Image: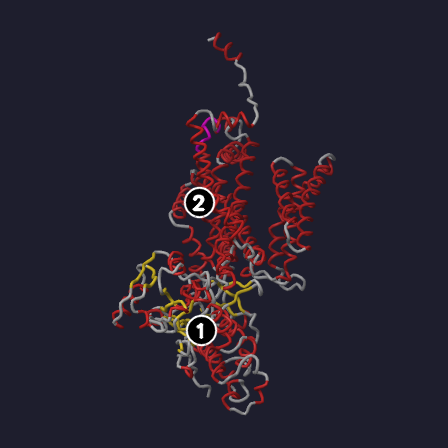
């Protein structure tokens, strides 16, 4: 009797485990809808890209805005995002394990990540790369002007190697001043011990704000290394990948067509077929993506903004201009000579 | 022999030394010319080290980053319109603590006096009017409940009943706190607030309190298990303790938060905060177990034999004779472990949670506050220090109360 009771108890305890995970949708979009919120893997401490804003009491930044855009495409509500701050070490495991639906966390698109980690990268949202910060008064405007300059750089990083390679390629001489830590490097540059400072452009932007007179400095638009940052999803759900891809293209296309959060409501009367397709007045694109409404892109533009608005709100305050003195950075629109280019909506 | 004993009986207690601060200074700091020199040198060294810090803290530092972000630092991204629930939890805890302090007295009384004083001091700071009133209310409630408890103590029957009610509330309190902060699914007035939105000092406290209260019993069981005569129990305990002690805490949290879903079937998801709490509990329990085992080894064999002779079973010997002595002996080691756990909660960023320290880091990435890292880090360090020191003092009181080191 007692044995039967024990066996029965164990079976009763284990039975619920068998039913776990049954009857739930298996596709990412279905799971997001059933849950009622998008789980977005973000970085919680990168100036301009992901941080906590005391005015809204929640996360803010360039990457965070793309989480909001994706949530708006699905739910028409930028607030329906659960932010999961991830460390660099945990981000890909968290994505592969299904802990997050999408990873938008200043992640560089590389061959090994794309192929070996079995991930899919969406369109590049930000072309980061090694750049240079100089004083506005210094009359250094291009890389060649750095000839003979003293440059503050971190020791033993690829940054130092890239710098030497660039000097050799351009046939100029530079005098690197090498530091082992970021604070010391920034201080040396601030005190005028170097003519220029080199690091990833987004890192330079963060450093610039900490200088004693940030407005006296500018970041050159030319970059000497490639760090394309893009949203990432898992292999195996192409519908979901499409939604992430076209969410980014929606913001870029809107900028190209001159549609912004301010004029999106008026432009509903537009006769331009490109704008009409973008805003979901023609073409049934939203339903084809598997979304509930054809207004998905119009909603993104209205509630989050187009690419230019997202960029200007988050990255521009750091001093990273898309066009510096008439010279386009890679993050300028292709119409201005940059690399930001949307695939046509047709 | 007899003469010796008589001499011993005549030994007087050492005279208590009482003298003023001037004499103290002379005897301790300026007794000889080289002591005077050393004192002056040390004073100069202290001045050189601290003056720069003080000068920076009072003139150049811009502390506005702290008040502007206070809400984030205290409760993280918890919805602002739901903050009354956090206040309610604070009031509930102070109510319980105050009442218990009045009824049982001793150690709790010191804690509640310190707590009420702290709330009163906070109420003097320039917060908003409603926050100041709420803080003053907390101070009053702490003091008032202590007085009420003290009065109830006089009436024998009321005393037993109120003690029972308070104990019941203590037992229910974890559920009440979780429901208040996390919400009741399906009810209109307590909408759910998922643990992703818990953060800041509130999360730090929750992790530390849950970690401490659950790891302690688990650790005691493991310590007893390691000394058990049942081979399976003994080997399990040894294996558990050695494995957990052999890996860094970050690894345990990483396993619990990132790797766990890979082993669970289908879409099963365990809450992030629960995972982190489990990781802290499992980790600390192994260390507590070894501390307690040290205490167990201190119990002389005669104690077991005496208990056996009195007819106590193995179980009751452990409960009444062994554990009280063993646990008392390892209070300092265990409190050290708890303080360490309290500070280690800052590792939860691995589990995608933002405790006090990581909320601070996230605020510093805001372009508005980029240049304020020194102020923010100093503030966070002092918050950790205040609570770690509070725990340390409390444990010293507890030791004195139980006469550790005197018997």
Q: Is residue B12 above or below residue A132?
A: above
Q: Residues within 10 Å of mark 2 (few under 14, many from 20)?
A: many
Question: Which one is nearer the viewer's eye here, A247 or A335?
Answer: A335
Residue B155 in percent (x, y) is at 74, 35
Residue at mark 2: B286
Q: Nearer the viewer, residue B176 or B296?
A: B176
Give the label on residue A321, or none: 1
Q: In the image, A173: left or right of B19?
A: left
Callouts 2 and 1 close, C-beta under 8 Å? no
Q: Is residue A232 toward the left or the right of residue B100 in the image?
A: left
Q: Between residue B39 and residue A258, name the one nearer to us.
A: B39
**What element does badge 2 sit on?**
helix
Look at the image and say whether residue A37 sits in the magenta stretch: no
Q: Secondary structure at mark 1?
A: loop
Please determine if labels 2 and 1 lie on a single subunit.
no
Number of numbered callouts drawn: 2
Give me the residue at 57% from left, 73% from top. A77
Instruction: Give me the C-alpha separation between circle 2 and circle 1.
Output: 54 Å
Mark 1 Cα-neighbour bin, 10 Å: few <14, some 14–19, many ≥20: many
| Image: B300 above or below B147 | above
Which numbered disc, 2 or 1, marks the residue closer to the eye?
Answer: 1
Whole-percent x and y of residue A123? Answer: 42, 77
The region drawn magenta spans B297-303
């Amino acid at each position: 009797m007692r044995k039967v009771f024990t066996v029965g108890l164990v079976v009763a305890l284990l039975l619920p485990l068998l039913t776990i995970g049954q009857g739930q949708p298996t596709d990412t979009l279905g799971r997001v809808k059933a849950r009622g919120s998008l789980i977005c893997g973000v970085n919680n401490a990168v100036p301009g890209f992901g941080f906590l804003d005391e005015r809204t009491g929640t996360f803010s930044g360039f990457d965070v805005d793309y989480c909001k855009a994706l949530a708006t495409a699905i739910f028409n509500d930028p607030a329906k995002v659960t932010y999961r701050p991830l460390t660099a070490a945990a981000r890909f495991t968290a994505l592969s394990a299904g802990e997050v639906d999408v990873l938008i966390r200043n992640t560089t698109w590389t061959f090994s990540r794309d192929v070996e980690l079995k991930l899919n990268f969406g369109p590049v949202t930000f072309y980061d790369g090694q750049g240079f910060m100089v004083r506005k008064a210094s009359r250094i405007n291009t890389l060649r002007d750095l000839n003979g300059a003293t440059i503050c750089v971190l020791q033993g990083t690829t940054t130092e190697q890239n710098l030497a390679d660039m000097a050799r390629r351009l046939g100029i001489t530079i005098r690197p001043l090498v530091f082992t830590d970021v604070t010391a490097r920034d201080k040396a540059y601030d005190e005028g011990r170097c003519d220029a400072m080199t690091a990833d452009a987004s890192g330079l932007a963060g450093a610039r704000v900490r200088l004693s007179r940030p407005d006296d400095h500018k970041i050159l638009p030319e970059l000497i290394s490639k760090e394309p940052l893009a949203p990432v999803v898992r292999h195996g759900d192409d519908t979901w990948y499409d939604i992430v891809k076209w969410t980014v293209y929606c913001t870029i296309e809107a900028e190209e067509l001159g549609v912004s959060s301010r004029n999106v409501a008026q432009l509903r009367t537009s006769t331009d077929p490109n704008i009409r397709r973008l805003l979901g007045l023609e073409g049934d694109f939203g339903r084809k993506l598997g979304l509930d409404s054809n207004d998905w892109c119009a909603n993104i533009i209205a509630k989050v903004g187009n690419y230019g608005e997202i960029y200007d709100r988050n990255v521009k305050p750091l001093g990273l201009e898309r066009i510096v003195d008439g010279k386009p950075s890679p993050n300028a629109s292709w119409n201005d000579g940059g690399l930001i280019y949307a695939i046509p909506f047709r | 022999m007899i003469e010796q004993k008589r001499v011993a009986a005549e030994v007087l207690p050492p005279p208590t030394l009482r003298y003023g601060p001037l004499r103290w200074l002379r005897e301790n700091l300026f007794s000889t010319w080289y002591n005077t020199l050393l004192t002056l040198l040390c004073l100069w060294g202290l001045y050189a080290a601290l003056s720069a810090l003080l000068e920076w803290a009072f003139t150049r530092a811009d502390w506005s980053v702290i008040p502007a972000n206070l809400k984030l630092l205290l409760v993280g991204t918890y919805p602002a319109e739901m903050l009354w629930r956090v206040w309610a939890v604070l009031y509930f805890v102070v109510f319980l603590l105050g009442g218990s302090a009045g009824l049982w007295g001793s150690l709790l009384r010191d804690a509640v006096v310190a707590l009420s004083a702290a709330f009163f001091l906070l109420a003097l700071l320039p917060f908003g009017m409603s926050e100041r009133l709420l803080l003053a209310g907390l101070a009053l409630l702490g003091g008032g409940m202590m007085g009420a408890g003290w009065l109830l103590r006089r009436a024998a029957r009321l005393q037993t009943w109120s003690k029972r009610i308070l104990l019941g509330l203590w037992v229910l309190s974890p559920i009440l706190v979780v429901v208040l902060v996390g919400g009741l699914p399906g009810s209109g007035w307590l909408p759910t607030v998922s643990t992703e939105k818990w953060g800041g000092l509130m999360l730090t406290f929750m992790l530390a309190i849950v970690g401490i209260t659950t790891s302690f019993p688990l650790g005691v069981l493991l310590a007893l298990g390691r000394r058990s005569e049942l081979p399976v129990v003994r080997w399990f305990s040894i294996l558990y303790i050695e494995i957990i002690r052999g890996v860094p805490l970050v690894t345990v949290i990483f396993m619990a938060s990132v790797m766990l879903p890979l082993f669970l079937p289908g879409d099963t998801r365990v809450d992030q905060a629960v995972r982190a709490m489990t990781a802290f509990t499992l980790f600390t329990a192994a260390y507590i177990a070894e501390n307690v085992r040290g205490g167990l080894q201190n119990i002389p064999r005669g104690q077991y034999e005496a208990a056996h002779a009195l007819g106590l079973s193995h179980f009751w010997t452990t409960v009444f004779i062994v554990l009280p002595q063993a646990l008392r002996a390892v209070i300092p080691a265990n409190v050290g472990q708890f303080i360490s756990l309290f500070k280690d909660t800052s590792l939860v960023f691995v589990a995608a949670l933002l405790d006090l320290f990581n909320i601070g880091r996230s605020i510093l990435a805001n372009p508005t506050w980029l240049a304020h890292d020194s102020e923010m880090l100093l503030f966070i360090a002092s918050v950790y220090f205040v609570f770690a020191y509070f725990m340390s003092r409390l444990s010293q009181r507890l030791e004195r109360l139980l006469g550790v080191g005197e018997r």
